Every structure is written in C-alpha cells, then in structure tokens.
Amino acid sequence: MRIQVLGDDTISQQARTYAEYRVFAALTQLAGAEQVQDAHVVLRRATRSGDGEDVTCIVTVTVAGSNMRVRTTGDHPYAAINRAIERLRSGGAADGLEWSVVESGR
C-alpha cells in the first residue's frame, strides 16, 4: 500500500506525517485492507467566508480498481485529518470496502 500526502507550504511537515500515519492506521484496521492499492491525501487551506481560513483534507483510496473519496474541513490540519479518518472508518466498515464518495463539511 502506497500513501502519498500533498500539501502546500502552509501545511507543516509534521501535519503531513500525521496524515500519513492516521490514514495508514485506519486502512490497516479495516476488513479487506489487503485490497487497498494506494491512498492520496491532499491538505490545503481554504478561505472561510467571513473570518479566516479552514483546512480541507481530501483522501482518495484505490481499492481493487475503484476509488473512494473523503473530503472534510476543519479549523486546522489536524481537525480536518481526524474528520477524514472518521469518515474512512465509518464508510469502510459499513460497506466492507465497497465505498462510494463521502463528503463532509464542518
């Protein structure tokens, strides 16, 4: 299983490493995890209407030739990553790795 984490200069290396660790840990705990081919994580800042910035975390997992995408936002990188992991776990466990697109805001 390959995990690639991308983020611009505003996302720290520590946050990228945390994302890689959390995605790996979540995927290895799911039934059928041996079918996971790779995962891509994209962390980016997004302007929030009004008073600041959010961080968006998009995780795309390739399982036996099909993709699942989870998109979440949070006040900081760790919040966005943690929300994405929650979605991965709930989507993967509920569907036995036959995932569909799952999106979540705050």
Image (cartoon, grey):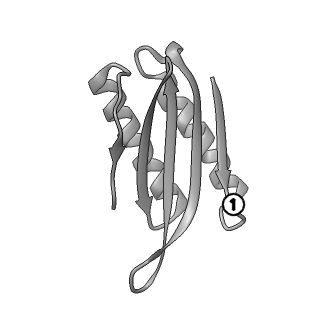
Q: Is residue 3 left or right of residue 88?
A: right
* Percent coordinates x, y for residue 12 in the rendering: 69, 60
Circle count: 1
Secondary structure, mark 1, is loop
> What's the amino acid at mark 1?
Ser
Quadrant (top left, top right, bottom left, bottom right) of the N terminus: top right
Judge whether 53 appears above or below 98 on screen. Answer: below
Judge whether 82 appears above or below 65 on screen. Answer: below
| Mark 1 surroundings within 10 Å by alpha-carbon count, few (fewer than 14), some (14 through 19), many (20 or more) | few
* Percent coordinates x, y for residue 86 in the rendering: 37, 41
Task: Identify the residue shown where x is 32% and y is 25%.
Answer: 93
* Percent coordinates x, y for residue 88 in the rendering: 40, 36
Q: Is residue 37 left or right of residue 102?
A: right
Quadrant of the rendered structure where residue 97 is? top left
User: Which residue is disc 1 drawn over?
Assistant: 12
Judge whether 75 appears above or below 50 on screen. Answer: above
What residue occupies the far left of the structure in this picture?
Answer: 94
Quadrant (top left, top right, bottom left, bottom right) of the C terminus: bottom left
* Percent coordinates x, y for residue 80 in the rendering: 46, 56
What residue occupies the far bottom of the structure in this picture?
Answer: 50
Task: Identify the residue shown where x is 50% and y is 43%.
Answer: 59
Along the line of sight, the residue nearer the viewer: 4 or 28 = 4
Q: Is residue 59 left or right of residue 102?
A: right
Task: Identify the residue shown where x is 50% and y is 53%.
Answer: 57
Q: Is residue 81 left or right of residue 13?
A: left
